Image (spheres, helix red, strand yellow):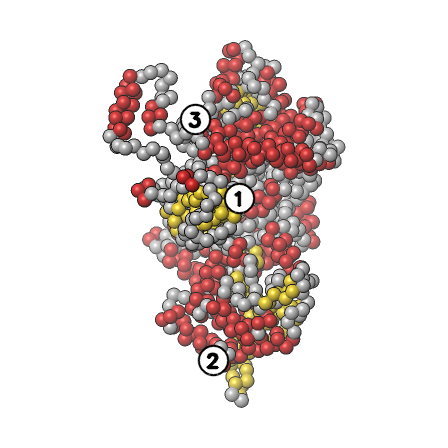
Amino acid sequence: MTEDSTQPGAGSDSGSYPQGTAPSGTGGTVHPGPGREGADDLVRLVDHHGVRHPNRHYDALVADVDGAALQKLYEDMVVVRRIDAEATALQRQGELALWPPLLGQEAAQIGSGRALRSDDFVFSSYRENAVAYCRGVDLADILRVWRGNASSGWDPYTINMATPQVIIGAQTLHATGYAMGIINDGADSVAVTYFGDGATSQGDVNEAMVFAASYQAPVIFFCQNNHWAISEPVGLQAHVPIARRAPGFGIPSVRVDGNDVLACLAVTREALARARSGGGPTFIEAVTYRMGPHTTADDPTRYRDANELEDWAARDPLARIATLLDSLGLLGADYSDAVKAKADAVAAELREGCLSMPEPAPSDVFRHVYSEPNSWLERQQDHYERYLASFAPAPQEGTR
Amino acid sequence: MSAPATDASPTTVREFRLPDLGEGLTESEIVQWHVTEGDTVELNQIIADVETAKAVVELPSPYAGVVVRLHEAAGTVVDVGSPIVSFRIAGEPEAVVRPVPEDEAPARREPNLVGYGAAVEKGGRPQRRSRSTVPAVGAPGPQVPALEATVLPATVLPAQAPAQTRTPTAAPKRTPVPTAALAPGRPLPAVHDGLSEASSQTVVAHADERPRSTPPVRKLARDLGIALEDLAGTGPGALITRADVLAALAGAAGPDAAVLDAAVLDAAVLDASTASVGSPEPARDERSAAATGEIRTPIKGMRKHTAAAMVASAFTAPHVTEFLTIDVTPTMELLAELKGSRAFEGTKVTPLTLVAKAVCIAVARNPTLNSSWDEAAQEIVQYSGVNLGIAAATPRGLLVPNIKGAQGLALVELARALNGLTETARAGRTPPADLAGGTLSITNIGVFGIDAGTPILNPGEAAILAMGAVRSMPWEYQGAVALRSVMTLSLSFDHRLVDGEQGSRFLADVGTILRNPAMVLTMV
């Protein structure tokens, strides 16, 4: 254990992370040019061996996380991993058109998601299903869009989380605008936007950061650097750690071990406190890894080095917390059984919710176009229904 | 077994139709079934591997129940929406049976491969790459993404290609940079993986004066490891053409280069790395590593598995190795004849093909060689069929996929099976089933120009035959010395199972066949 607790991984081969840029041999030569610090500038409280490292600054932010709270965080991660696995299976079984797995990113999403207050508002990408779980989403609603059952999965105001944005990075603008609204309201809630390393190349994200800094808006830019923008390695588009871009916009930033749920909780809490007290935006780069494919339609073995996956499997976010709990005597059979039962129950609920989802009627396509009645649209709907009625008898049950 | 449930218990038969596993796919190939009819499966149990245009994926069972029918065999390309497997599910009312009415069969869709996934040729997977993490020193140079590491088919790499992309044994970090490979006069690397700033700058410096060529030709050159800078274009305005690249390949690749294995290349690259003087600004560790010529590599992945298997085999089975050197001129003549025959048109036949056949014939006369020692059960397992393993150097490392039921294959079938096995292995696509269940193996060290060795048994097998290179040598022939084609066979066997007598008889039989293929008439 090093004296400087901000660098707990220093000197350990398997524990040291790539510099947030190119993993070795991924095709780019890119690495931070001036100054090669950054390799071990990650905030890390629990290393990949499950060892808790004291940290002068961040310990206070998670002082309330006792054994029971840590057990809850672990349970959350097990459950969302199970949700992810079940949804992947449902896609393979033809029940979903597509699914974007989050395998490997559980700690980044649970750690940050559990730091939020219910009146904070989340603007996420399509991979943040663990965040949605933290927000209390109805499980079947996560799948609704992927099943082609609805245009959006849930009412954003019931859980204060916008439905997932598929346009890369666009949600950062929505979050910043919402945060500017919070200032106008005089409230102390915070907008949190999630996006990936690839999104940081989008104009939207950069514009959002300019506006967030200009207005000192209470918004958190939570970037999950999972190392791959579909098939492009992060090093290709980030010559310096992504977090180091933010200060250029006037936004303080932090790099955190995205596979350390406790550290993710701590840095998110710090950013939330800053935003609530008028301190403006924060950029968090959670360095994690997408262990699965980009989506179920992707084959990462075509572009990814197998060694890399092995390296990151050794840094699994769940395994380290299990080890820590075990060392604290908190991973007893009763607890483990309960966690497994919870995950099984959630998976069963998810599957049942998916399979029992009513098929939408053809005319449902006309709903939600306008919030108020529209005579021209009603006319179209009428025509369409009469057209469909001409095919008698109509099929009783849709087939897949 | 395949009939739907007819008993009185309330059961349902449900058909599972092939879903669209990607986005907008119209068909997929069933690579492999993991279940057979009659198997009981759990929900989400993996029942098959399916290959789409985008990926090989695992199919989880949508039901818990009994597999009553597999509608399609492995290897079949199935339209999306066609039934592939039926399950009998207990405890559901009979009425829920859902057959597929013909008119509900899915409408044929046009392929629409939008959006996702890297567009890579079949089999063009990235190989396990160097674990070096030498970052660029100083300001990052311009990126050359088009030159990023690309898969190089092992079969066509010319020997002089720098091949920096494939150094599985390079250091985990602080790799000495193989600048020696970039000495004046040496060809510039066509493939650049960013190992060294020096090479990066060199490539960038030359980027402006890149020889003229078209993108498909540049890709071809890159795939083949040919440096365009070395070529003189014969097209209009000195344009480098496809023919120029192929001509360079033919010139560069010696007769043995085509079969040069990844391991050999790796060793060559390693030598170059070790001999190099390091990067322009080597860190202290790099200097010391270069000084001692030491490169440390974490033991993991294939290397780890291979090591464990070899240690287990070497220290479990007492190995005996015997050698036999024979005049295989008649076999080579037969080979030439087969190559010209219509039956073998389009089929590659090599000395390995005939050795494999000879082994199958010889093992039928000496079945002890085709057995296994079951320590746990205290039993000797005698196999009736031969699952013939072929040691193959692949992008993933050493693999020994086997040909199931090799003893029953006619020579032409065996030749095709060998070709298929090798191609699949080279492409890194060997399915796990091909690796399991081997009973006897052959390793062809002759392709490396080696004569003999003491091969280590593939774990669980009783024998392994190493075939050496076919050499033209002075040899006794009809009472005089003549130049003949001579080969050495090395046979290792598990002395727990196989005595010297049986091993010797087997090896002698193989030798007899290769010395005079007509002698097969006395054996079968």
- Judge from the rendering whether residue B498 lies leftward or rightward of residue A371; answer left or right: right
The residue sitting at 49% across, 47% down in the picture is: B66
The residue sitting at 38% across, 17% down in the picture is: A371
- Judge from the rendering whether residue B414 lies leftward or rightward of residue A340; answer left or right: left
Tag 1 residue: B42
Instruction: Give percent across and percent down for residue B32.
Output: 47, 52
Q: Please give the count of numbered marks on the rendered protein.
A: 3
Q: Which mark is residue A152?
A: 3
| Identity, as a three-letter code, of the amino acid under mark 1 | Glu
Q: Is residue A342 above or below residue B51?
A: above
- Indicate which disc, 2 or 1, sits on the residue closer to the N terminus: 1
| Identity, as a three-letter code, of the amino acid under mark 2 | Leu
User: Would residue B113 be visible to someone looking at this image?
Assistant: no
Tag 2 residue: B521
Tell which subunit mark 3 falls on.
A
Q: Residues within 10 Å of mark 1 (few under 14, many from 20)?
A: some
What is the distance, in whole Å, between disc 2 and disc 1 at their CAs?
52 Å
Instruction: Give percent across and percent down for residue B350.
Output: 47, 69
Q: Which mark is residue B401?
A: none
Marks 2 and 1 share the same chain: yes
The residue sitting at 46% across, 53% down in the picture is: B1
Q: Secondary structure at mark 1?
A: loop
| Identity, as a three-letter code, of the amino acid under mark 3 | Ser
Foreground: disc 3 or disc 1: 1
Q: Secondary structure at mark 2?
A: helix
What is the distance, in whole Å, between disc 3 and disc 2 at their CAs?
74 Å
Which quadrant of the structure image shows residue A93?
A: top left
Instruction: Give percent across and percent down for residue A383.
Output: 25, 24
Q: Are marks 3 and 1 in contact (CB under 8 Å)?
A: no
